[in-house]
Amino acid sequence: MTAAENADRYDPRAIQQKWQQRWADLDTFSASDDPADPRPRRYVLDMFPYPSGDLHMGHAEAYAVGDAMARYYFQRDYNVLHPIGWDAFGLPAENAAIRNNTHPADWTYKNIETQAASFRNYAVSFDWSRRLQTCDPAYYRWTQWLFLRFYERGLAYRKDGYVNWCPVDQTVLANEQVINGRCERCGAEVIRRALTQWYFKITEYADRLLADMAPLEGKWPERVLLMQRNWIGRSEGAEVRFSIEGRHEPVTVFTTRPDTLYGATFFVVAADSALANELCAPEHAAEFESYLAEVRKLTDIERQAADREKTGVFLGRYAINPVNNERIEVWAADYVLPDYGTGAIMAVPAHDQRDLDFARKFGLPVRVVVDTRLPDPAQTGTATPGEGTLVNSGPLDGLSKSAAIAKIIEILAARDLGRAATSYRLRDWLVSRQRFWGAPIPIVYCDGCGEVAVPDDQLPVLLPDLRGQDLAPKGASPLAAATDWVNTECPKCGGPAKRDTDTMDTFVDSSWYFLRYCSPTFEHGPFDVEAVRRWSPVDLYVGGVEHAILHLLYSRFFVKVLHDMRMLDFVEPFTALVNQGQVINQGKAMSKSLGNGVDLGLQLAEHGVDAIRLTMIFASPPEDDIDWADVRPEALVRFLTRVYRVAADVASVSSAAAAADLAAGDLDLRKVTHKTIDEVTRLVESTRLNVAVARLMELVSAARRTIDSGGGAADPAVREAAETLTVLLSLFAPYTAEECWELLGHAPSVALAGWPVADPALLVEETATCVVQVDGKVRDRLEVPADIGEDELRELALAAPGVERALAGRGVRTVIVRAPKLVNVVSA
RNA sequence: UCCCCCAUAGCUCAAGGGCAGAGCGACCGGUUGUUAACCGGCUGAUCUUGGUUCGAUUCCAGGUGGGGGAGCCA
């Protein structure tokens, strides 16, 4: 059989069909729950998909990366947990149900089946036995159970407040779901609305969410850690109590610059806070009310616009600076936020640009208290927030900024006027949603008993059977209309009660799914503590950077709470994180409106699964975007054909059974093979998968060269290269690898063939090329033994003809020797 | 405006204080069993200006360009 005949036989589609059927019987990728299984465990997790339709190009990249990593650990004979499930609650299902007059479950489960079939076609190494869907009652029962545990611990609570409301989706949004003042889902401008809602007290964990990031350093992408730190937004400073004339209680402010306290020349409270309303003197009420009305009209987008002119009104009241007893005006303004710090600030215009802008607009005094050697802010309009020496500050005069901060805190604390304090930007997580397709909040309201938790043995609180127009947005939860469902019995007194009609944010569902995979059918709790102890935390988590804050922060929070409940013995859910990039087209995200979408199904049909997977992996480092306009899947089809031909050539002249004398094989090829093993191993370990594929291409070229112009296909080194190639390739192109493996005379599955080990003896070079420079320029080259001594090399170099020529009679000042690679002769 | 990261061939990436090299693409040639495959060749690349050094693409400083993040958070 010749190579050409074999080449004709490489048919990706036929191979896919053949192996999909054979693999179905092999059960290759199930994780062993046997505690006695001696193999080390690895938990490789892909972020579970939302079932919005069939898989798309983005999924194809993400799962190609995760699957390569999982398959690597399978090859290394780890006991690998690589599960899959669906994040199946959510708005699109509800909208589809309204459109088609059906139940959201119809759409959801249909799409899940479509995606599941596509995953199988895509040959992802999932353990299908652990599949879960967050919309299954058997799952959301435990989401509700967890809510109740949070409730018991005071971590779930209900409060009134202004919330972010999306007028299109007709539901509230968490702060994390508002991007630049717009709904992250539909892009509508978010408005403020007063509602009573459930919150999770994530702020109680702010410090730990920050501190526990230290071990993730180097294992999570730097930018994700940065975004989480920014989001938590810890600031250190002090709280200072200002008394207010005519008010009994003092008002506390938070400041990061207590050293500038002597420079506080006015006082500002958030206009839209209860405090502003209370402090306003009666004769200023009309003015304040009209200002407040203006502020309320602003959308978040307008309010957050950069370089906005400062606005505000004087409240007719005075605060007393506790250190110098100065009387300073109290103003209301919208540049002070009601929900950060205490909603009130001391304004130090000389050293804070915002305060300076405000002072200059309203003619308020500016006093420099830190000498920064920069021009007077009152003149320049530029505040001087930097380091300097304290002036005009009584006992602080002459101190540096940091010394003054320490000193003033000491003074304030001694007189009970303040203390060191930390403030966070992080807000509590609003979890109520006025939507149908989610887990109902398991709380009932009883006229007699008030807020009552649904007992565990009555879980799950099942969703009522609503469909079609029942689900249309009405500004309140669709569940409220299901009166039979809403009206219930109080679990405490048996009297009439009403159910909470909101459902939970779907991010609650996804904050613990990775734990459920460890024991997906467990019925005595959300997870079997022992199973989780064996598998978790997740060793490698693969998913998109769009979850840098939301999902990852919430999951980290959940794990910490569960740790405090003594259900987990670790505090961070994901030991390592890889964010794969997006698949874009012609420089832009694929979108319907641009018409630049690429259909994954068509790509797979045209080029085959393996070629698409390889294209995804080879196109760029996993974390970079792939521009589909820049890639050529057909090039990878050609590469796979070449791989197949190498295997076919070997198969045609030798059999796996015949023990060939490897030592007699082509040494150069063997060196390439073993160097490839060594490098690909390290590249995969560090998820530099694109480079790993490039190395495989080089190995194919080397094998081809030996077949065509070296020892031929019968050379045992060629078989070694082909078998090595096949196993390494199985991470990326499982169908082709399986077919080659069979061709080479082995039984399936190549996925468990075992990762090859490089022979150290074949990795060392006996000779090296020594570059001989004169004054830094290359003048000669010498082939020398790799272990040559410095003195010997110096002699050889000085005698080299190129050196003599270059020196042209000049003397030698010094000779730098870096054996065995380099000698630099410096002329006199 | 501020903070972080990056800058190597047409593209995607390596290496790295000491010969700058792979894959892909394009092009040219050879070859065969010519709707094509294979083989060979080719592309003469370290953003810019200084500094340190025997030697800088690598280290340092400034600049430029790109990416990301923050965004009245006191």
Image (cartoon, coloured by chain):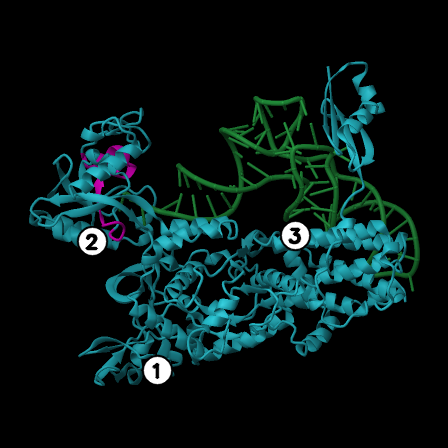
Which label's residue is closer to the chain start, 2 or 1?
A: 2
- Give the labeled residue for mark 3: A682
Q: The green chain is which one?
A: B
- Pick whichever, A622 or A686, lies toward us: A686
- Horizontal side of residue A157 vs A555, given as left or right: left
Which label's residue is closer to the chain start, 3 or 2?
A: 2
Q: In x, y percent, where is residue A28?
A: 65, 73
- Tell how many labels: 3
Which stretch appears magenta?
A338-364
Q: Are marks 1 and 3 on the same chain?
A: yes
Numbered badge on residue A670? none
Chain of the residue under label 2: A
Q: What residue appears at the point 31 percent right and 28 percent down from the top-left corner?
A: A388
**Disc 3 to disc 2, how far (Cα)?**
57 Å
Amino acid at dot 1: Asp
In the rendered view, would you say A412 is above or below A133? above
- Pick whichever, A181 or A133, lies toward us: A133
SS for tag 3? helix
Chain of the residue under label 1: A
SS for tag 1? helix
Amino acid at dot 3: Arg
- Give the labeled residue for mark 1: A457
In this rendering, does residue A30 appear at all?
Answer: yes
Q: Are marks 3 and 2 on the same chain?
A: yes
In the rendered view, would you say A553 is above or below A89? above
Disc 2, disc 1: CB below 8 Å?
Answer: no
**Disc 1 to disc 3, how far (Cα)?**
51 Å
Q: Which chain is cyan?
A: A
- Give the labeled residue for mark 2: A273
**Disc 2 to disc 1, how far (Cα)?**
42 Å
Question: In the rendered image, which quarter is residue A36 located in?
Answer: bottom right
Disc 3, disc 2: CB below 8 Å?
Answer: no
